[in-house]
Amino acid sequence: MQAMKPSPSLRPCSPQPRARLLIVGCGDVGMRLLPLVRGRFAVRVLTPSAQRLPALRAAGALPLVGNLDEPATLARLGGLADAVVHLAPPQAAGGEDRRTRALVQALARRGRVRRFVYVSTTGVYGDAGGARIDETHRLAPASERAQRRVDAERVLRAWARAQGVALAILRAPGIYAGNRPGGHPRERLARGTPVLAREDDVHSNHIHADDLARACAVALHRARPLRALNACDDSELLVGDYYDLAADITGLPRPPRLPRAALQEMLTPQQMSFLAESRRLVNRRLREELRLVLRYPTVEEGLRRG
């Protein structure tokens, strides 16, 4: 008599392996992202520093030592991950983002990636004269720093099309949080650094670090392929008003306001570059396509609670 074949419902089930996620550039935002994704993914983190290995392991990730400035150290990345979150900034000089180029070359050696989230910057838009703009606004980077970000976006788009990768680009403005190193206005307020006079002031945009991490996590599942999204909150503030608000919340003196010409003599060219562009970002795609409910929809809530 032939042995009966087991019913499909009675066959032992082998657990499905979790998809692998690679986080590149796991600084402050990456560490906030880790607890949001480690239940769904087996998380790998690329770090250039062996000193960070214990902290990354303790956070639930498998760290890999590799340096985007040394492409030979990235050989193991090919075929490693199903999804990638790229948080690493470009190198400090040049019009091209050599780090992103090295990353996609390594990943392309054994194409496995299906989802990719890149955190870019809203600096790619350049100056909009204070107008409200969405993601269809033309890219007009005014600084070399922003040019590198535009280059990274273009490289990633071309690679994603060629490899069949669902790419999401999150364009982030100023990132802040009460416990983010250098990411709270209290340090500048304590120094008494002046801001622009109201007649010379520019509009700024912000996102709390926790909300940016949440946007990255959600984009891995909900973002449309080859889609750019403004990852910002709902605030529309002049820079001086932002620091006045922060001063009132923290109990520090409001900063002095000076004409642009006077401020140029006190601040570095890089510091002044952040005061040369004015735009008010529309975040409709973030809210409607990613269906992200911001934990800190305004900087007032973020500064008071986060």
Image (cartoon, rainbow, N blue to C red):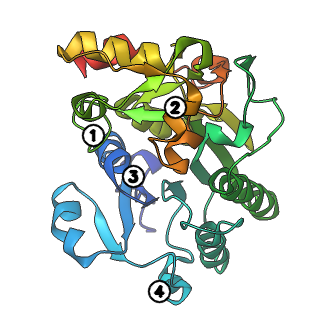
Where residue 36 sits, quadrant-wise, is: top left
Q: What residue sits right under mark 4 in the picture?
A: 73
Q: Earlier in the sequence, mark 3 or mark 1?
A: 3
Q: Which mark is in front, 1 or 4?
A: 1
Q: Which mark is residue 134?
A: none
Disc 4 crowd rating (10 Å Cα; few below 14, some 14-19, many 20+) is: some
Report whether residue 10 is seen: yes
Q: Earlier in the sequence, mark 3 or mark 4?
A: 3
> How far is mark 3 from mark 4, CA to CA?
24 Å
| Residue 99 x, y percent position in the rendering | 58, 70
> How far is mark 1 from mark 4, CA to CA?
29 Å
Label 2 with label 4: CB-CB less than 8 Å: no
Q: Earlier in the sequence, mark 2 or mark 4?
A: 4
| Residue 272 x, y percent position in the rendering | 55, 40
Q: What residue sits right under mark 2 in the picture?
A: 262
Give the residue displayed 64% in from the left and 21% down from the top.
281
> How far is mark 2 from mark 1, CA to CA?
30 Å
Where residue 228 sits, quadrant-wise, is: top right
Where does the N terminus fall, quadrant-wise?
bottom left
Where residue 248 sits, quadrant-wise, is: top left
In-image side of 139 versus 119 (left or right): right
| Residue 7 x, y percent position in the rendering | 44, 50
Q: Which mark is in front, 2 or 4?
A: 2
- Kind of residue at disc 1: Arg
Give the residue displayed 21% in from the left and 36% down from the top.
179
Give the residue displayed 48% in from the left and 54% down from the top.
87
